[in-house]
Image (cartoon, rainbow, N blue to C red):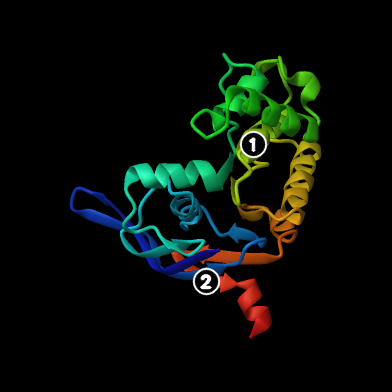
Amino acid sequence: MIELQQLSKAHRAGVVETLALDAIDLQIEAGEYVAVTGPSGCGKSTLLGLLGLLDRPTAGRYLLQGQDLSRKSERELAALRRERIGFVFQSFNLVDELSVQQNVQLALRYGPLSEREQRLRVSEVLERLGLAHRAAHHPSQLSGGQQQRVAIARAIAARPALLLADEPTGNLDSAHGQEVMKLLRELNDEGTTLVMVTHSAEHAAQASRSLRLLDGRLLVDALAEALA
């Protein structure tokens, strides 16, 4: 599903250039559950941003479901991001002026579904996540765990093939964190490809594959080691 070939990302400030990712080669198959680990500043979030088409690489190639994205326009990348990729962040990024229903529906606003179809899809997703009774509430009226479930509902409303999670339990207590992890595992079991950045060794152990980055390089690929 994902193929990275010598993918690099450099950040420049004046005459100083910092290499955030250095010639990453990586393949992720459809349906995999991959944890990305490593110390702060090692390139984990940069990698997730490139996978999610939020940024462009400085060098190398990124193929998503067989498509080379290097020559896609910003408009084409935005369409691919909207149709195929869902995002879950440590901060929930919900709009407090909107209801739960409206927050989730934001993910469908520029897609092909009619207003009625959008509402039906949102109702299905909220029901599936146990949030139907909270549809008219605003984020400030919810617990942290409920807010993260709303964020996940928004991420999966368009039925993306790829779900990217950046420290999804970072702002939650242990009980709500386990609840979110259980939900992510269920989504992966249903066929969603999941790539999760985490500092938690416990959460990384729940993935089927673990990658470790250091100084922008892929230091360990647990699956590759196991197959060697």
Instruction: Determine the secondary structure under disc 2.
Output: strand
| Residue at the disc numbered 2 | 219
**Which residue ends up furthest to the left in the rendered image?**
15
Q: Residue furthest bottom?
A: 228
Q: Nearer the viewer, residue 49 or 100?
A: 100
Residue drawn at x 35%, y 57% is 57
Q: Could you say which disc has been placed on residue 105 in the image?
A: none
Residue 220 seen in the figure: yes
Q: Which residue is mark 1?
A: 157
Q: Is residue 8 above or below residue 188?
A: below
Can you give x and y, in whole percent of width and height, for residue 178 in the image?
79, 44
Residues at marks 2 and 1, CA–CA distance in whole angstroms = 34 Å
Residue nearest the observer in this picture, 110 or 227: 110
**Left or right: residue 180 compared with residue 36:** right
Q: Residue at x 72, y 47 (%)?
A: 184
**Nearer the camera: disc 2 or disc 1:** 1
Residue 140: percent from left, percent from top: 66, 17
Q: Is residue 176 left or right of residue 25?
A: right
How many numbered circles does the render carry?
2
